[in-house]
Image (tube, rainbow, N blue to C red):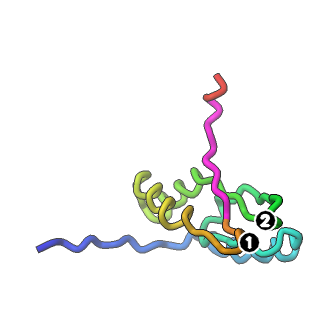
Amino acid sequence: MKKKRKLKKSKLSPDAFLDEKLKDFIETELPEIGEVMVPIGLSDALVGFCTSERNSACLVYDANAIIDILMKRDEMTREEAIEFFEFNIESVRTAEGNHPLYIWSIPPVWKN
């Protein structure tokens, strides 16, 4: 008989309130960027926002920081966190085009 794999429960970070705080900040302080998609529990990885000729703005997140959040918060291995990120976070799109962009920062060693 096959053993059922126990799924890990996702824990909200102690800073989960930042998602609502971020939405409020955008609405009051940055109304020009309009409505944007805010991923839940990842506000600590936010690096800014971008605009383009398509007339919709989006938030920009550091993918490496998201991986770190998933590893610490949800007790995932690096490989599990990357797979979760790719299939459950990065691949989410909205019809309005206001879904976040994710950047993978490159360590400064490439300059040497």
* Image point (50%, 64%), residue name: 73
Q: What element does badge 1 sit on? A: loop
Instruction: Please state which amino acid type lies under the numbered disc 2.
Output: Ala
Against 108, residue 12 (above or below) is below
Q: What element does badge 2 sit on? A: loop
50 and 45: which one is in front?
Answer: 50
* Image point (23%, 74%), residue name: 4
Q: Which residue is mark 1?
A: 36
Q: Which residue is mark 2?
A: 57
Instruction: Please state which amino acid type lies under the numbered disc 1.
Output: Val
Instruction: Compute the Cα span from label 1 to label 2.
Output: 7 Å
Against 77, residue 22 (above or below) is below
Which residues make up the magenta segment?
A: 100-109
Category of crowding for the residue at label 1, using alpha-carbon neighbours closer than 10 angstroms: few (below 14), some (14–19), many (at least 20):
many
* Image point (41%, 74%), residue name: 9
Quadrant where the C terminus lies?
top right
